[in-house]
Structure formats: C-alpha cells, structure tokens
Amino acid sequence: MTQGNPLLLILNFALPLLLGNLLQQTYNVVDAAIVGRILGANALAGVGASTSVQFLILGFCIGTCSGFGIPIAQRFGAQDYKHMKDYLFHGYVLSAVSAVFLTTVCALFTTQILRLLKTPDEIFRNAYIYLLIIFLGIPCTILYNLLSGYLRAVGDSRTPFIFLSLSTILNIGLDFVCVAVFHWGVAGAAVATVCSQFLSGILCLIVILRKSKLLHIGRENCHISGAKIKTMLLMGAPMGLQFSITAIGSMVMQSSNNGLGSIYVSAFTAGTRIKQFVMCPFDAIATAVSVFCGQNYGAGIFDRIKKGIRLGFIINIAYGILSGIALIFAGRQMAMLFMSADEVAVLDAAAKYLACLGTCYWILGSLAIFRLSVQGLGFSGRAIFSGVSEMIARILVSLIFVPLVGFNAICWADQAAWIAACSYLWPTLRYCLRKVKASLTAAPRT
C-alpha cells in the first residue's frame, strides 16, 4: 500500500473485508431469523439478551488480535522481516494465554453475568445455554481473528474472505440442521457458530503453513522479549479494552432494556442484527485505511497517510447518509426477516429503533475512520478514550432517561455515544498526525 493510487488500493483491500463482513453478518441475520421464526420471539430474546456481554468478551478478543497486527504491518511496510516474525511469535503466545484465561473465567460466571443483565426469567434458560456455548468457543474466535489479522497485515485480505465465506455457508447449513432438524433449540445456533469459527481459523492456519512463507517463524524468533511483549500489549490491549469499555456502556443499556420486558428485548435483538449488517462497509473501509496508515507510516510517507484518511472519510460519510435513509424508511420491513407480521408490538419497536439510528448513521461512519486511523498510526492508547466516551454516554442515557421515557431512550443511546466519541477522536486524530509528521521529519526513513 506504499505505492499506487490510494483510492484503488483502499477499495481493493476493503472489498474482500466487506464481502467477508457481509457474509458474517448474513449468518447473524439468518441465525436470528431461524431462531425467531422456528422457535419464537422468546427464543430470539434469549439469544439476544446477552448481545452486549458477547460484544464485551468477543470484542476484546477481536480488538486485541487486530492490535497485534499493527506492529506487524509497520515492520512489513519498513521491510524489517526479522522483527516482524518476532512479533508474530509473541502474538501467538499472548493469544494462547488469553484464550485459556477468558474461556475459564467466562464459563464459570455465565449465570452471574446474565443476572447482572437483568435477564427476564422466561428467557433465562435459553440465554444461559446460548451464552455458555459461545464462551466455550472463545479459543476459536481468537484463532481466526489472530491469523486473519496476520494475513491482512501483510496485504492479504482475500484469503481470510475466502475461508470466511466457506465457514459462513457451513454455519447457515449447520444452523438450520441443528435447530430445525435436530431440534437442539438455541444450543444448536450456538454450536453452529462455534464450529464455523473453528473451521475458519484452521483454514487460515493451513494457508500460513503451506503457502505464506513470509509469516513462518523459526527457532530464532521463538524467544520471549519483554520489550516486544510490551509493544504488543500497548497495541493490542487498548484496542481490546476499547471494545470492552464500549461494551460496558452497552451492557448497562441492555440491562435497562431487558428490564422493559421480552417484547423490547426481541425488538432490540432484531434491530441490532440489522444495524451490524448495515455497518459492514464502515468497518471494511476503516480497516483498510488503518492498514494503509500503518504501512505508509512504516515506509515514512506522510502525504499518503493524510490522503488515505481523507478518502476513507468521504466514502464512509456518503454511505452513511444513504444507509441511514434506508433504515428510516424500510426498518419495519427489515425487522420482518426475524418474526412474523403477527408480532406487531415487536415490529413497531424495532422499526422505531432503526429509524432513530438512521438519522445519525453517517456519524458512525466518521467514528470508524477516526478511531482506526488513530490505531493504525500506532496510538492505540489514545483511541481507547473514545470507548470511554461511548461508555459514559450510554450509561448516562440508560440510567437517567430510560426510567423516564422507556424504550424511546434506548432508541437514542447509540447516537449519543457516537457523538461523544467523535468529539474526542477528531482533535485526537489531528494531534496524532502532527506527531507522526514531526517524527518522520526528524528521522526520515528510506
């Protein structure tokens, strides 16, 4: 990404990411649709009652793995392959430790987590079964996201997309078989998810071992370095914590929503699935810009960094406006993917939630570019405070306004969080660019 047309490079890199994200979210939509239409609204509520805590834990895993790819992208851009492979080894070690620790702790405290979320009694059993299986699959989530992050760091976004495509097809097939044929209930949906993630990770590992010699490590790389562990943690932990801190606000928000009853839990679940699907282009473009920034920072080309950020911002704003209009006027029809037309109250609530999101959806596109650009430049520690801003905004709305106006406050909590985060990230990004420019000017790279 250090040579050639920045727009074409960003779009070419983002396309496989976008298709992969769409496939993954298509599974989430199909998963919820199968559960909602076959098992009913209460089962759908059971699957969705723990969405925020899944985002808390799995988001930490995904964010940390993405952060581990930043020093690799920077060393790759600088053509410093020796240190790049050292970082690969340390990423493996840290990820293995994280997988064991998180799986054990989360599985042991599943019941307490659901009680903390005020999960209604009528959906508690389904929520427990689903969440426990998802927690047991944490190592599979880490495996795929770490290896796909490594591949993307060296410019290969197509291989992870291919394998994600295969696993998504398998996921949908297993989902239908486990729920509709074997009648495993919500457990079948969770098993299908974990199995597909495991397959994706194994396929990435096979490609790395057989075809990607650049990502092979030797004995000379397998030595623990305190300095490199520190670097990896400074890149990975803030990105993981950023997801988790954001999710704390979402947990408070979901707890408040769960207290409103199963109708609103079902509506929120359907609306969240649609929101995640529609935001896929934001994530793909922002990830491409992040890698673009990392590689060009490693190569010492400041002008390309600024140009890449500007292009990503324009693309996300334009898409945000168009997708927001779709959410406003077609939200109810989208929600009908998950339940029958007889569920009038649930559909009304879901449509209101999506329409409110649509009015500010372009802000989410800006947020994605700002945050991942800051991270791609190596300032993950500063980006974490955007998550704090989101957390505080969601908590304030949930604790102050939900008791006063109920679900109407839930419909506007995300937008308050996006505005708070952007208010912090915009000046932060400008500061980071000044620091990068100063460092490259002081010590030009060849």
Image (cartoon, rainbow, N blue to C red):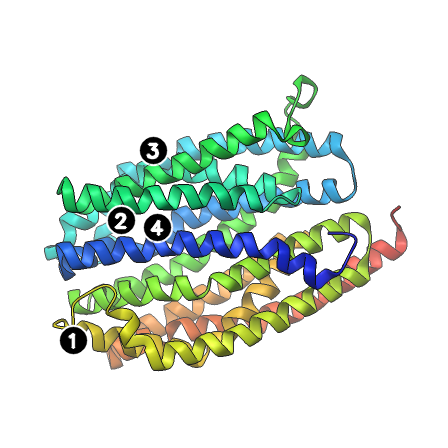
First in sequence, mark 2 or 1: give its number: 2
The residue tagged 2 is: 113
First in sequence, mark 2 or 3: give its number: 3
Label at residue 181: none
First in sequence, mark 1 or 4: give its number: 4
At label 1, counting other C-alpha atoms closer than 10 Å, the crowd grade (few under 14, some 14-19, many 20 or more) is few
Looking at the rendered structure, the kind of residue marked 2 is: Ile
**On screen, 392 above or below 90?**
below
- Distance from the alpha carbon under mark 3 to that under mark 1: 39 Å
Looking at the rendered structure, the kind of residue marked 1 is: Ala
Label at residue 54: 4
Residue 318: quadrant of the picture = bottom right
| Front disc: 1 or 4 | 1
- Distance from the alpha carbon under mark 2 to that under mark 1: 28 Å
Looking at the rendered structure, the kind of residue marked 4 is: Gln
Q: Secondary structure at mark 3?
A: helix
* Residue at image point 63% right, 66% down: 312
The residue tagged 1 is: 345
Residue 123: quadrant of the picture = bottom left
- Distance from the alpha carbon under mark 4 to that under mark 3: 15 Å
Q: Nearer the viewer, residue 333 or 250?
A: 333
What x and y, as percent, mark residue 155?
66, 45
- Distance from the alpha carbon under mark 2 to that under mark 4: 11 Å
* Residue at image point 49% right, 43% down: 162
| Front disc: 2 or 1 | 1
Q: Secondary structure at mark 2?
A: helix
The residue tagged 3 is: 104
